[in-house]
Amino acid sequence: MAQQEQKKKNKGLIIVLSILLLGSISFNVYSFLNNKAEAKKAKEEYVQLSNDHEEVNQLLEDAEELTKKLEGDIAEKDTEIQANLAEIKRIKAENDALIKSGLSKDEINRRLKANLAMVKKLNSQLESKVDELLLANKNLESKNNELTTDLDSVNTINNKLSKKVAIASELQVPQPVIEFYKKRNSQKRPWKRTSLARRTDKIEFSFTIMSNEITETGEKNVTLKIITPEGKTMGNLDINGDDLNVHPNGALTYAAHKAFTYTGEEQNITLAYVNTDLEFPEGSYNSEILIDGKVVSSSSFNLK
């Protein structure tokens, strides 16, 4: 009788344990499925957040690429285009910060979607503005093409402009007359012409600055540069006509300098390089005449 009672108790205990075990299994299965569903939902939300974020980035790239269609600095000078680009860049920066903000996914998603809608609107406005500017540029090109069809008129204008530019570009100096002199002990006739290098004490350049009604009149400077057969520049003046107290090796020097007042009329100028202590080397020399630092004449000569 006691054994039967014990068997009944054991049987009852097994039933209770079985019910508890089944309940636990059911709860675990439910929790697993629920967690799996939440994980899937979170993943989908993350993917959606990433997609929205990426789409904003792509729209920014599209907007920047769109503005490159405009030639020159049109896009840079258009305030509406630059304002839209700046706003899209600001929204992109805001989205980058949102992703790392730690806010709830629902809040991040709401803001990202709002920003995405705004970027789409800005990008659409940008496309319209670029199309407008491209069309305006195309119309200008069309008008320009129409103007160029009148070849006779264009050629006449170009010829007149070319002549004025040529006249106004620089003062004209024909080839100078170059003469060589030896110093003499005579007050009346202190110089005697020579053609020998070893007898030369002075090289004289005489030249004419041609009249020019376009060139601005006023004070100007003319400078003479002489280059020896060895490739060295003669003299001890700088480009402004000031003496160089120290003459470093290889320094660019000038032989003569003169200030003059240009009136627009033809003017005769003489520049001379004098050096009684130097024996001029034989060979071929090159020379340049400069007015206000610009070469206006080049020539060469020989000393035997």
Image (tube, rainbow, N blue to C red):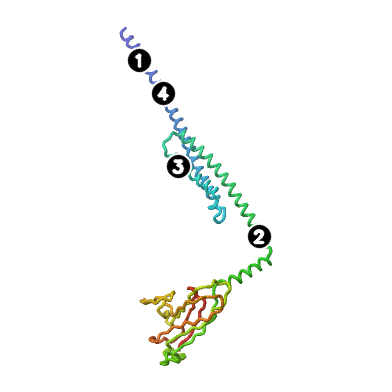
Please report contact status of discs 1 and 2: CB closer than 8 Å, yes or no.
no
Specify the label residue 96 is tagged with. 3
* Residue 2 pos. (x, y %): 30, 8
Relative placement, left or right, of 58 versus 251 is: right
From what the image shows, is residue 256 above or below residue 51?
below
Q: Residues within 10 Å of mark 1 (few under 14, many from 20)?
A: few
Q: Residues within 10 Å of mark 3 (few under 14, many from 20)?
A: some
Residue at the outermost left position:
2
Between marks 4 and 1 in the image, the one whose residue lies nearer the viewer: 4
- What is the spatial separation of the Cα atoms under label 4 and label 3, in whole angstroms? 40 Å
- Name the residue at 46% across, 43% down: 93
Q: Secondary structure at mark 1?
A: helix
**Residue linked to disc 1:** 13
User: Which residue: 42% across, 92% down?
Assistant: 186
Q: How many angstroms separate mark 3 from mark 2 (CA)?
A: 48 Å
Closest to the camera, between mark 1 and mark 2, is 2
Label 3, label 1: how far apart the Cα atoms are: 60 Å
Kindly identify which numbered label has been placed on residue 145.
Answer: 2
Mark 4, residue position? 27
Q: Position of residue 269 (x, y in %)?
A: 51, 81
Closest to the observer, 37 or 21: 37
Q: Which three-letter amino acid code belongs to the residue tagged 3?
A: Asp
Q: Would residue 28 appear left or right of 208 to someone viewing this image?
A: left
Q: Quadrant of the N terminus?
A: top left
Q: Which is closer to the viewer, label 4 or label 2?
A: 2
